[in-house]
Amino acid sequence: MTRPAPWRLDPSAYPVGDEFGTRYQDLDPNGHLNNVAFAALFENARVRINRATRPRPANERMMVASVTIAYLREGSFPEPVTICSGIGRIGSSSWTIEQAMFQADQCIATCDTVVVCRTDDAAKPLRAEVRAELGSRMTRGG
């Protein structure tokens, strides 16, 4: 597994940080947060960024094209996690959300998600307003 760049392990590199509770049902047989729980926690934080990119025309949709999670440490229950998020790259019709999950001051996972904007069921260049909104949430280390 490729280790993330050192800046990815620093919460201050991300413009957005949210705390999420862990649940007993998120545990695997070894008593650690399972991979589905990691994915769901990252998704909850990712949705907050995507929903903040408003308003959108009715014919414009944002769709996840790819998700890559690097599991760095075991997560535990009942301690909450903090997920830090930001925009890492803005392309012509897509962008990448970069995230890191922290628990007890340790980075336990990173996640990169490519989101594609589709207008009238086809990939089209991002509107200037979307670019500006995404640009205001760029990570500070890459």
Image (cartoon, rainbow, N blue to C red):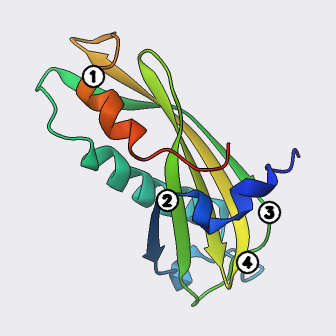
Query: What residue is shown at x 49% (from left), y 20% (from top)?
Result: 91
Disc on res. 67:
none
Of residue 31 and residue 46, the one placed in the foreground of this image is 46
Separation of marks 4 and 1 at Cα, in angstroms = 48 Å
Query: What residue is shown at x 50% (from left), y 50% (from top)?
Result: 86
Name which of mark 3 and mark 1 comes first in the sequence.
3
Disc on res. 72:
3
Which circle, 2 or 4, is nearer the viewer? 2
Q: Amino acid at mark 2?
A: Ala
Separation of marks 4 and 3 at Cα, in angstroms = 19 Å
Residue 49 to residue 25: above or below: above
Q: Position of residue 62 (x, y in %)?
A: 33, 31
Residues marked 2 and 4 touching at CB (< 8 Å)? no
Rate crowding at label 2 as few (under 14), some (14 to 19) or many (20 or more) other CA atoms within 10 Å: few
- Mark 4 lies on a secondary structure that is loop
Name which of mark 1 and mark 2 comes first in the sequence.
2
Disc on res. 29:
4
Horizontal arrangement in the rendering, residue 28 relative to residue 114 (left or right): right
Q: Which residue is mark 1?
A: 128
Which circle, 3 or 1, is nearer the viewer? 1
Q: Which residue is mark 2?
A: 40
